[in-house]
Amino acid sequence: MLVRDLAARGVRDVVLAPGSRSAPLAYALAEADAAGELTLHVRVDERTAGFLALGLARGSELVRLENTISHGQRAVGTDGVLEAAPARGTDAVPGPGGTVVPVAVVTTSGTAVANLHPAVLEAHHTGVPLLVLTADRPHELRGTGASQTTDQVGIFAGALRFAADVPAPDGRAGEHRDLVAVAARAVAAAVGARTGHPGPVHLNISFREPLQPSSPLVPDAGRSPRAADRASAGTHQGGTSAAPGGERAASPASGAWSQPVVGRAVPRYTDAPALPGDPPRTVVVAGDGAGPQARRLAEAHGWPLFAEPSSGACGGPNAVAGYRLVLGAHELAATIEQVVVLGRPTLSRPVQRLLGREDVAVTVVTPGGGPWPDPARNAALVVPGLAPSWFEGPATAETGGVTPDPPGFLAAWREAGRAAAGVLGSVTADEAVAAGLLSAPYAALAVARAVAATLGEGDLLVVGSSNPVRDLDLVLGLDGAAPTILANRGLAGIDGMVSTATGVALAAARDGRRTRALLGDLTFLHDAGGLLCGPDEPHANLQVIVVNDDGGSIFATLEHGALAAASPAGAAAFERVFGTPHGANLGQLCAGYGVDHQLVLDVPSLRHALQAPSHGIQVIEVHVPRAARLAESRDLAARVVAAVRAVGISSDR
């Protein structure tokens, strides 16, 4: 009943971690998978299962959004309005034009539930629709010391859009209808149908024994396989009662029961306000999930664009290369009077300092009814979305669609970006690392550049936290258009990145797209269990590039690195509690999982490995040095500022 109803509401993928108490759901999912109503993925580790579901949701969401845009349709909303972070602030409309589709994850009771918490938190902070279905003992066994029983109600408190404790079925009249109703409410909350604020929901479902079917399993002749049709079309068939303005549900589970059409309770956008400050001296900051409208906004008004890798807004004539280092040229940074923020910027302290300046007017564009990103507590204006009038800038309204010569402010930032790109390009050029990556300065930057430059059109890149995403931030655009990039920036942790990338790869493959992941060694080791996939499971085509510096080099670029450089005692303490060298043999680890592993020592070998055909999961390991990371970071920042100042940019431009 529940599984059929969720499939009818657009749930395409379900991840299951096996267990006895969840057996009724497991049998139903296996049956639905065999009938082609959904795709089942089984994992033995609940933490891995949670992040696999997260990756499936994010990959499906991105592919649907980009396909919508590529076919010339409106990216979001039934009224044609562009919103901030469109992939995460839309209505759930399974089928053509829909972008938000929930993915479910199912576990048994006990510690299995707690292991989902990291993925639930990431989904909460990133706005990913995740249906968490956890099995539980019936109410009469709770609090009695029964095996594998704990208090699961409220375990994810503070990180959910909706939660319900579903009692064990007892055959009472109306319980099927009640179950369908709670499923409808859960899906509507997960996709943000009413609030515009998607995220995780939790159904804690009780089961009494017996937990197995009462008769042998046989195929259901009334449920015809259609998985292949859905995969080729890239859509779901049927409507959803959670879709505002859509059809009433025609679920096989709900029958003739009337289900509500859920309308949106928050406005989609605001009319373009009179922005404070001097509009020409405005920059656009595109954080994680900002979407392509951030770039459109910057180009419409002739504003410089500071775009993080996972913003979805990288590239274009107004994008400033190495923007976080360019902000170190204080005389140029001082010319900024206003910032428009889309998405959630998390990568750099220079950007956060800019957003916290008392002399800068900050406008935050954030969709739906969720919290807005403003850690500096300095926002002057918060709006839910971008109306068409926001894009009527100099390039469209005043010049008949012809882009004018850039004003002095934009020209200065473009010139600064070119100066920064010159420095970044020189330190990562082939000749700069020709002696091999293990001894070359800026080796990790060179790896990030090679990976970004090698990706083909339509390829996806999942990037890990810490240094990889920051390295990528500096080199994007040096070799042409930026690839499509995803990152778990909700809590910016290293949890579950192999599993997230696997989920993205599974979703992207349905659209014929290839996926790679760029991870640090600690991030990879943290989720090495994500490499495990049973022989009967859908297998991903994924290349994982591991930048191995034998530890946590991100800490060297923070205050801890400066303390380490001050004394031998500080260096020893740093190495043990922050550097955390591990000495792990990644090749042997991969062999244990039956995963292909390749060690490359230079950039040409890396490019060759990336361009070669791959099947299944392949790990490409690259060794880079760690000892000089702090010195290199400081030197690079100084060189970029010097290059910016050398071109004669001043505050009066």
Image (cartoon, helix red, strand yellow):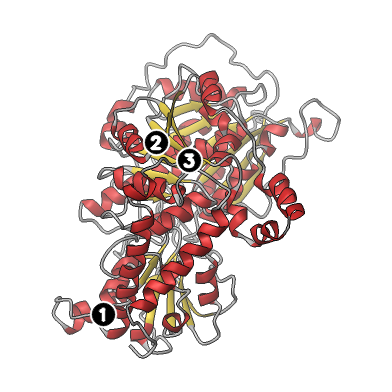
Q: Secondary structure at mark 2?
A: helix
Label 1: how many Cα within 10 Å (few below 14, some 14–19, many 20+)? many
Taking 563 as reference, is 578 above or below it?
Answer: above
Name the residue beneath numbered marker 3: 438
Where residue 106 sits: x, y (%)? 58, 32
Q: Is residue 390 left or right of residue 203?
A: left
Disc on the earlier residue, 3 or 1: 1
Q: Amino acid at mark 3?
A: Leu
Identify the residue shown where x is 36% and y is 38%. Answer: 515
C-alpha span from label 3 to label 2: 30 Å
Where residue 180 sits: x, y (%)? 52, 39
Identify the residue shown where x is 29% and y is 34%. Answer: 611
Answer with the quarter of the image where residue 316 lies.
bottom left
Name the residue beneath numbered marker 2: 505
Answer with the quarter of the image where residue 256 lies.
top left
Label annotation for residue 48 = none
Residues tagged 3 and 1 counted as in contact (Cβ below 8 A) = no
C-alpha span from label 3 to label 1: 48 Å
C-alpha span from label 1 to label 2: 38 Å
Answer with the quarter of the image where residue 526 lies.
top right
Disc on the earlier residue, 1 or 2: 1
Name the residue beneath numbered marker 1: 393
Where residue 389 sits: x, y (%)? 29, 78
Q: Is residue 112 left or right of residue 224?
A: right
Residue in front for this viewpoint, 196 or 515: 515
Residue 103: in sight, yes or no?
Answer: no
Identify the residue shown where x is 63% and y is 48%. Answer: 163
Residue 458: in sight, yes or no?
Answer: yes
Q: Amino acid at mark 1?
A: Gly
Residue in front for this viewpoint, 38 or 332: 332
